[in-house]
Image (tube, grey):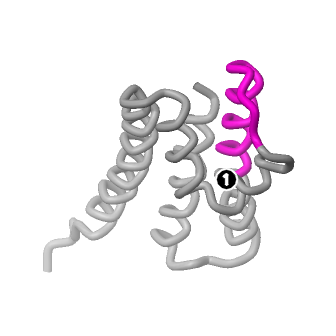
């Protein structure tokens, strides 16, 4: 559950940075940290799942997941769970979509002009 919260916060930080027109400073640093935090949390989740399931993986597999998480994490899920891999992938996609929708709502609220000429 905490991985999903981390993914949502990382996606929201990136979306809000774009919403604020790249303000720089601390906000830019936050987006930089979020860019590393999301793949790190996914790699840690995969590593914990490997240990819990007793799987044999290559040495330094977690670094490979960190670097190539959009490809390696789904492959790992399908390899260990089969068709049940669609559950975690669906949760991940729903969290990403929720973050993007929250950004779209903020953009639409910002773009509404409430002043009458």
**From which residue to which does the magenta span run?**
39-57
Task: Give the quadrant of the N terminus.
Answer: top right
Is residue 112 highlighted in magenta?
Answer: no
Question: Which of the pair 18/36 is nearer the observer?
Answer: 36
Residue at (65, 51) in percent of width and height: 38
Residue at (70, 43) in percent of width and height: 41
Q: Is residue 59 left or right of residue 4?
A: right
Residue 16, position in %: x, y? 51, 62
Q: Is residue 100 left or right of residue 20?
A: left
Residue at (75, 75) in percent of width and height: 25
Q: Is residue 104 left or right of residue 6?
A: left
Residue at (43, 41) in percent of width and height: 95
Is residue 40 highlighted in magenta?
Answer: yes
Tag 1 residue? 39
Magenta stretch mostly in which secondary structure? helix
Question: Which of the pair 94/67 is nearer the observer?
Answer: 67
Residue 20, position in %: x, y? 51, 71
Local packing at callout 1 (Cα closer than 10 Å; few below 14, some 14-19, many 20+) is many
Residue 45, position in %: x, y? 68, 34
Residue 117 sits in which quadrant? bottom left
Asked if 88 appears above or below 68 in the picture, the reply is above
Considering every residue shown, the one lying at the far left of the view is: 117
Asked if 64 appears above or below 24 in the picture, the reply is above
Considering every residue shown, the one lying at the far right of the view is: 59
Asked if 83 appears above or below 42 in the picture, the reply is above
Q: Is residue 104 left or right of residue 45?
A: left
Residue 89, position in %: x, y? 43, 39
């Amino acid at each position: 559950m905490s991985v999903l919260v981390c993914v949502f916060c990382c996606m929201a930080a990136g979306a809000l940075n774009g919403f604020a027109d790249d303000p720089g400073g601390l906000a830019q640093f936050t987006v930089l940290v979020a860019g590393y935090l999301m793949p790190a949390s996914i790699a840690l989740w995969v590593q914990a799942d490997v240990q819990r399931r007793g799987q044999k993986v290559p040495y330094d597999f977690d670094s490979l997941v960190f670097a190539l998480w959009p490809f390696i994490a789904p492959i790992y899920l399908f390899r260990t769970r089969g068709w049940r891999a669609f559950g975690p992938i669906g949760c991940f996609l729903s969290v990403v979509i929720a973050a993007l929708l929250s950004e779209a709502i903020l953009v639409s609220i910002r773009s509404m002009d409430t002043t009458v000429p």
